[in-house]
Image (cartoon, rainbow, N blue to C red):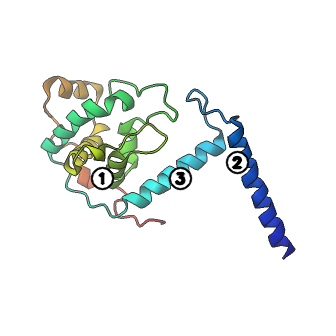
């Protein structure tokens, strides 16, 4: 019984200490100051677990349609390139956390996870929720393009930008063939 009282008292002290620290204003929220290792790990862990849980079970359409990829390219150029960059441009600076390079991120996340992130956004990262003013079909088009993005050289990306066409894209990396974790069960 004494252990339980000590544990509860210690927990209350920790909560009060954290609240006092937050209230004091000493925690620096400036985007120019990196988060501590503990804060960064906690936020990253919570973000990844939340994305995995909330995206589980989202059914995806076939994403290897060239027209769908082209629509996604146009959305990417209009909405995403300013923060996430492209094969020709670095991601934007001044964000904390920094926007990820989506060519790499799209290889690591499933299509359902990319869809959920694009549709719902992510708090405290600058990532907006595009599902507010874009249809699910538009968001799936963005995902289709993201799944092709890592295959694009800077020259191919520029060619797409210049020609507004997907010349040479047909047959490259069929998204449906390399999808990972699409059927992973939450918590495993």
Q: Secondary structure at mark 1?
A: helix
Residue 101: image quadrant is top left
Circle 3 or circle 2, nearest the eye = 2
| Sequence-earlier tag: 3 or 2 | 2
The residue that label 3 is drawn on is: 46
Q: What number is the disc on residue 178? A: 1
Residue 77 sits above or below residue 125 on the image: above
121 left or right of 97 in image:
left
Residue 38, quarter of the rendered image: top right
Nearer mark to the viewer, of 1 and 3: 3
Which label was assigned to residue 106? Answer: none
- Mark 2 to mark 1 CA distance (whole Å): 46 Å
Percent of width and height locating residue 62: 19, 55
> Horizontal placement of 32 versus 18: left or right?
left
Q: In the rendered image, which residue does mark 2 sit on?
A: 19
Q: Residue 93: horizontal and vertical position, in percent?
A: 46, 25
The 10 Å Cα crowd at callout 1, few under 14, some 14 to 19, many 20 or more, is: few
- Give me the residue at 42% from left, 26% from top: 92
The residue lying toward the viewer, choosing from 146 and 78, is: 78
Question: Residue at (86%, 73%) from the top-left corner?
Answer: 2
């Amino acid at each position: 019984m004494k252990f339980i009282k000590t544990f509860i008292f210690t927990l209350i002290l920790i909560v009060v200490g954290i609240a006092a620290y937050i209230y004091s204003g000493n925690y620096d929220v400036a985007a120019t100051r990196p988060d501590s290792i503990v804060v960064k790990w906690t936020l990253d862990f919570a973000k990844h677990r939340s994305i995995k849980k909330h995206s589980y079970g989202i059914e995806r359409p076939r994403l290897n349609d060239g027209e769908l990829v082209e629509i996604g390219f146009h959305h990417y150029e209009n909405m995403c390139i300013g923060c996430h960059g492209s094969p020709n441009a670095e991601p934007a600076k001044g964000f904390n956390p920094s926007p990820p390079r989506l060519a790499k991120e799209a290889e690591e996340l499933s299509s359902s996870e990319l869809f959920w992130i694009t549709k719902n956004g992510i708090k405290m990262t600058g990532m907006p929720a595009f599902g507010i003013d874009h249809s699910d079909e538009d968001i799936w088009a963005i995902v289709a393009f993201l799944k092709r993005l890592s295959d694009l050289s800077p020259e191919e990306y520029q060619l797409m930008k210049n020609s507004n066409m997907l010349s040479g894209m047909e047959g490259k990396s069929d998204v449906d063939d390399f999808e990972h974790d699409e059927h992973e069960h939450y918590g495993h």
